[in-house]
Image: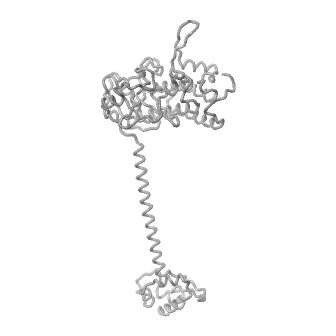
Amino acid sequence: MLCSDAVAVRSRSWAWSQRERAMCKARSSSDSDALASPRPAAAPSSRRSSSSSAKRRPAAAAGVSTSSPSTSSYSGAAPSGTGTGTGTASAQRRGTTSSSSTSSASSSRASLAAARASLPDPPVLYPFQELAAATNSFLAKRAGGSGSSSSAAYWRCSIRGRDAALFQLHPRPGAAAVDAAALARIGRYHHTSLARLLGACPAGAHLYLAYELPPGAATLAACLRSPRNPSFTALRTWVSRVQVAADVAQGLEYVHHHAGAVHGRVSPSAVIVSDPGLRARLTHFGAAEFAAPADAGESPYATPGSSEPSREADVYAFGVLLLELLSGEEPARYRFDRGTKEFQRVSVLETAAAASAGGSVRNWVDRRLGDSFPVAAAERLVAVALRCAAAEDRPDMTWVAGKVSKVYLESRAWEQKVQVPDEFSVSVAPR
């Protein structure tokens, strides 16, 4: 029966298509022998059925249709050529799987390398001679403040190929020495609202801290007020100022509730604003551990009656900084009183509280913004700042950051709605 089946296959092979004849031509002589001689019963085959099945289905056992020769088609198992193609396809699938695995592994390594590159380098202790060489023996002109004793002043220099801002601070009395362990404890935190600490140099009666300085960056104090041109400000739009306030609030919230520390030196001189985007970053993070507060007892950012760093003191300082952002004025200034013919010290807290109580926040906001700001948002921010600077029951930075971020989102929606121009503003009513 197997021999007759083989003859039937050969007699119908002339009706196959040209492609099938080419495929059959590639069959080896071993396949013909397999058709002519019976296989052992124990040997399994996926291309041929057993001899008992061939007896029950004489024509179909060899995989040949019983239709006419002109329309006959191969409906059984694939010839050896097709089997070879199947094996090639399997090899291709295995190759594709291997290629995909290799690509996935390469992508994982690239992602890991990118994640490692985004982490800050551990800060180092710089020798005093290296900082002196970078600043021309500390005789180079400072930026960000007026006078060599100003806490806002810093040196713009290059340290080991990086643009840096070098600040000079006074150490805390009885503070622990600055060593590699202290710097590693400070530099292990990484957040977009915190400036990257490059290193420190304790030298005698001063402490030097170096931070990475992005191109076109300056302190917030320099962005708000220019001694040469009082009418100029880099933060000329409402959204840019709320953006800075939100960045500082989120940075302090991170310091308090994620790093488990306090800042202790919140002021415009400790905030670096970089371009593009005018994003703000906090410097001096961790300096409260071994640096004295700026002008302790006299700083307008210090809590009245206390100069010790704490979370409540940071919240108070942020409230003053927020009012300074909104008004554009210094937190404390002297104004000549024509009645008494004397100069009186005026605090931004006092003017903001009077404006909020009298409903004149619109007139109190920095005039360099024109009228290009939402008055309701400004009133809410003034209320948040006054609550931060309250004598008691101050909120935590989580609440403050949430309120400021909400106003920022509302301000962005307002800006897109009214499409505020950058070059000029239009006043709809006298201020």
Q: Taking 329 as reference, is 190 left or right?
A: left
Q: Taking 245 as reference, is 39 left or right?
A: left
Q: Where is residue 273 in the image (x, y as percent from the top left)?
A: 49, 32
Q: Which of 260 and 9 is in front in this view?
A: 9
Q: Position of residue 347 (x, y in %)?
A: 53, 17
Quarter residue 164 falls in: top left
Q: In this orientation, does residue 277 appear?
A: yes
Q: How many numbered discs?
A: 0
Q: Where is residue 187 in the image (x, y as percent from the top left)?
A: 38, 36
Q: Taking 174 as reference, is 69 left or right?
A: right
Quarter residue 131 falls in: top left
The structure residue drawn at horizontal position 45% and vertical position 84%, both measured from the top left corner, is 27
Q: Which of 427 and 411 is in front in this view?
A: 427
Quarter of the figure that contains the C terminus: top right
Q: Residue placed farthest to the top in the image?
A: 340
Q: Position of residue 54 (x, y in %)?
A: 50, 88
Q: In this orientation, does residue 393 appear?
A: no
The structure residue drawn at horizontal position 47% and vertical position 76%, both measured from the top left corner, is 85
Q: Nearer the viewer, residue 255 or 113?
A: 113
Instruction: Name the image colouring.
Output: one colour
Q: Nearer the viewer, residue 87 or 46?
A: 87
334 in relation to 118, above or below: above
Quarter residue 155 falls in: top left
